[in-house]
Image (cartoon, helix red, strand yellow):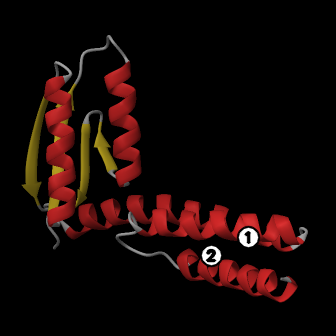
């Protein structure tokens, strides 16, 4: 079984700005929400460091936070964590796929702009893609096809 880095935290309700900022940063990291105020990521040095920084921000905002390294007690729990992360990423790849297909039917300018944006989006998603779903390949192929279409018309 893999090990995971967990962060348990508690922030005051007011002001709400630190709570919103934390939520956005956790979402950018692609955390699995285990319970209210308990999140997890696969353990690696980058994720451990990121969670540590976020824990520091929670404390600076008047809250409490602790970082844990753990492994699930069963394979079923680990599979559930992996499925949670993978399903969220798969939805993002599906959105990229749909946008690439829509852009392919647009004019040259639309295709080029979409291509730049979708390549950037694929990189962003890839940073959080710990357990790649099949949709990753489909989205990448659709963006590659869009790139070929945009190149042909230039």
Q: Position of residue 26 (x, y in %)?
A: 34, 44
Residue at (20%, 62%) from the top-left corner?
A: 46
Mark 2 or mark 1: name the one nearer the start of the chain: 1
Residue at (79%, 80%) from the top-left corner?
A: 150
Q: How many angstroms separate mark 2 from mark 1 (CA)? A: 8 Å
Local secondary structure at mark 2: helix
Q: Position of residue 87 (x, y in %)?
A: 48, 62
Residue at (34%, 70%) from the top-left corner?
A: 130
Q: Position of residue 149 (x, y in %)?
A: 81, 84
Label number found at residue 139? 2
Residue occupying the far top of the picture? 14
Q: Can I make out residue 38 in this image? A: yes
User: To which residue does mark 1 refer?
Assistant: 100
Mark 1 Cα-neighbour bin, 10 Å: few <14, some 14–19, many ≥20: many
Tell which of 39 and 49 is nearer to you: 49
Q: Determine contact: label 2, label 1, CB under 8 Å.
A: yes
Tell me where residue 129 sits by quadrant: bottom left
Tell which of 23 and 4 is nearer to you: 23
């Amino acid at each position: 079984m893999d090990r995971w880095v967990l962060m348990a935290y508690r922030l005051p309700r007011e002001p709400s700005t630190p709570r919103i900022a934390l939520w956005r940063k956790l979402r950018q990291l692609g955390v699995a929400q285990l319970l209210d105020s308990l999140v997890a990521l696969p353990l690696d040095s980058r994720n451990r460091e990121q969670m540590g920084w976020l824990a520091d921000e929670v404390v600076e905002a008047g809250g409490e936070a602790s970082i844990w390294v753990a492994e699930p007690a069963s394979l079923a729990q680990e599979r559930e964590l992996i499925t949670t992360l993978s399903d969220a990423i798969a939805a993002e790849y599906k959105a990229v796929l749909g946008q690439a297909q829509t852009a392919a039917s647009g004019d040259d300018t639309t295709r080029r702009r979409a291509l730049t944006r979708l390549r950037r989006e694929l990189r962003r998603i890839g940073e959080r893609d710990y357990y790649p779903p099949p949709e990753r390949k489909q989205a990448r192929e659709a963006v590659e096809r869009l790139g070929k279409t945009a190149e042909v018309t230039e």
